[in-house]
Image (tube, rainbow, N blue to C red):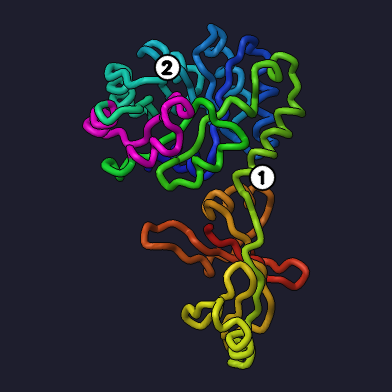
Amino acid sequence: MNSIFELVKKIGIVPVVKIENPDYALGLSHALCEGGIPIIEITFRTDKAYDAMKNISYKNKDIIIGAGTVLNTAQVDKALDAGAKFMVSPGFNEKVVSYCIKKNVPIVPGCITPSEIEKALEMGINILKFFPAASSGGIGMIKDLSAPYSNILFMPTGGVSLDNMNEYLSSDKVIACGGTFIAKEDLIKSQDFDKIKELAEKTVNKILDLNISHVGSYEDNDNSIKSFSDIFSNNYESIDDSLIIKNVFEVRKTKEKNNKFISFSTISVERAIYHLENRKVEFDFTSMKKDKNDNIVYVSLKNKISDFEINLIKK
């Protein structure tokens, strides 16, 4: 996967913006970065898009710029000149896609039908914009389309909100969501960058969606496991050297540790690691476990909190 798309996947959300005044672009970019979302898609829906991209790329190196609503090759050239690193188009324009491939520029073309998907696959494109997402069937349609085309990833845009975003992000067929709800046009016009930063932070917290799954302890003998199994004989499962009472408690048998832990669930451990590392959280990657699809399903924080080892597990 292209390094830009790897970052897109880790962040989980791409703010889609329309800018009328390029002088507001830099402040907007700083607000997004400070809120934990160092990426932006500036659409060619105004004639100021080029200047807005240029203002950001020259003065804020911490943010990745994408160009949206790319409808022709001239816009590709303008976007690249202004510092954009990837292109997004609402539909599948073969001429634009071919041009981007020739110039080795990442592009996410809009595809919502099997025929469009097959055209994209023929050209080596497997990351697609699903637009307009809400009125085209939402996550249900994405799941249906993913069945025969198992190697594609979608970026749903259109009708995505803070409330329904995680319905999409819970699917391993969704690389990220595109959303206008973080940096709305009226907030940009009023230069309410504090509000945009607040919305970015809320979005990151929503993406993390951390919830206590269960608590537990490490033991060096069988006594605790036997005691719990006697009490909860009809409501537990034994996995390897652990006894798990689902969503309540876990006892792990080990001779190396003797402490307690809290496991937090999240829809994507990879995204959680990315966003928490941005908050200076450190991880013990020697503890990391992956599933058969190479997705991280478990990792521990490097440091304890209130004598608890903290684990992240995939929902």
- Disc 2 packing (10 Å; few <14; some 14–19; many ≥20): many
* Amino acid beneath label 2: Val
Residue 265 position in % (x across, y down)? 59, 59
Locate residue 59: give its quadrant.
top right
* Left or right: 18, with 89 as reference point: right
The residues colored magenta run 116-145
167 or 169, nearer to the observer = 167
- Is 293 within the magenta? no
Q: CA distance from mark 2 to mark 1?
A: 31 Å
Question: 11 or 172: nearer the eye?
Answer: 172
Residue 112 picture quarter:
top left
Q: Position of residue 13 (x, y in %)?
A: 55, 36
Name the residue at 74% across, 66% down. Answer: 305
| Residue 128 magenta-highlighted | yes
Q: On residue 205, which mark appears?
A: 1
Residue drawn at 67 percent across, 35 percent down: 200
Comes first in the chain, label 2 or label 1:
2
Disc marking residue 133: none
Nearer the observer, 54 or 215: 215
Task: Name the residue at the front extreme.
Answer: 234
* Image: 167 above or below 119: below
Side of 137 where 24 appears, left or right: right
> Disc 1 marks which amino acid?
Asn
> Which residue matches tag 2?
70
